[in-house]
Image (spheres, helix red, strand yellow):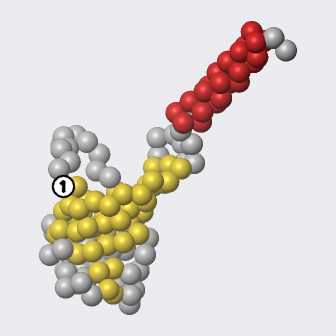
Amino acid sequence: MSPARVLTCVSALIATFGVGFATAWFTRDPHAATAERLTGTVTWSNEQTQLFTVEADGARREPADDATVYRLADDEWTDRSGTIRADGSYPECLAGTPGEPVTEDRHRVELEVVHRDFGGSHRTHLAVAVRCLD
């Protein structure tokens, strides 16, 4: 085999590998989940539906922006003293007045969140760990 033919074959192989790698790297998987740890302030919570919203530290939101709604995905949480609670109770930093499932009390939290993305515009945000800070 001539050196020119070898060079052509190697160049084609490298180009094919490069295109394949770039395609795999830059093409988003429509069924993906990403994890994030965030700290912020609870702005709304509903104990019955286990849904709540958080204003993340450093995030600048315009009043017209939709809030990200998180779903509590675990019955274990950490109270402000550092005690892990696994008794099925609703986290104290998300709960309001007894007998009132919906609250807008503002409490500081640290969350570990998984963002599920199934393609399209809808994403699901699951709080897999809650730590009350105040």
Q: Residue at x 57, y 48 (%)?
A: 31
Q: Is residue 104 above or below residue 15?
A: below
For the residue marked with disc 1, what is the amino acid?
Answer: Asp
Q: Residue at x 17, y 69 (%)?
A: 107
Residue at disc 1, secondary structure: loop
In the depicted view, which residue is nearer to us: 37 or 75? Answer: 37
Whole-percent x, y for residue 126 in the image: 42, 63
Whole-percent x, y for residue 76 in the image: 38, 81
Q: Residue furthest bottom?
A: 87
Q: Quadrant of residue 37?
A: bottom left
Residue 134 is left or right of residue 71, and the answer is left
Q: Kindly identify which residue carries mark 1.
A: 57
Q: Is residue 25 visible?
A: yes
Residue 9 is left or right of residue 31, and the answer is right
Whole-percent x, y for residue 40 in the image: 20, 61
Whole-percent x, y for residue 122 in the image: 47, 46
